[in-house]
Image (cartoon, rainbow, N blue to C red):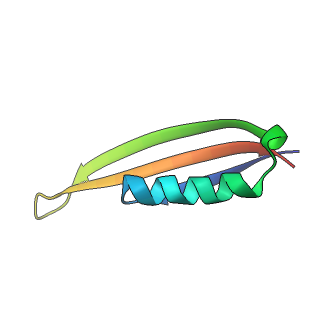
Amino acid sequence: MIRVKVFDESHEKDLEDAVNVFLKKIDDSKFVDIKYQVGVSINDDENQIYCFSAMIVYKT
């Protein structure tokens, strides 16, 4: 069965850490793909807000 795991963090390093922890839990042969995306928006105070996301596709 193909599954996905989605990660969403405010900082690049937090996303990297979360993805690496998950990848250690699955066997290399189960890994299929990873997709990465960054979203940027500006809040009411005109501060930039970043959203770093990754989706890991893997087999169970």
Estimate the x, y position of residue 21 in percent, counting from the top left: 63, 59
Residue at x 31%, y 53% (from the top left corner): 50
Residue at x 44%, y 60% (from the top left corner): 14
**Image position of 36 with respect to 8: above or below:** above
Residue at x 50%, y 39% (from the top left corner): 36
Q: Nearer the viewer, residue 55 or 11?
A: 11
Left or right position of 26 against 56: right
Left or right position of 16 against 30: left
Q: Quadrant of residue 46?
A: bottom left
Number of dots carrying numbers: 0
Left or right position of 27 against 12: right
Q: In the image as oriented, which residue stretches furthest toward the left?
A: 45
Estimate the x, y position of residue 55 in percent, counting from the top left: 60, 46
Q: Nearer the viewer, residue 4 or 26?
A: 26
Q: Quadrant of residue 58?
A: top right
Estimate the x, y position of residue 47 in percent, counting from the top left: 15, 59
**Image position of 32 with respect to 44: above or below:** above
Residue at x 25%, y 50% (from the top left corner): 41
Left or right position of 51 against 53: left
Estimate the x, y position of residue 10 in percent, counting from the top left: 37, 60
Which of the image's four quarters has the N terminus? top right
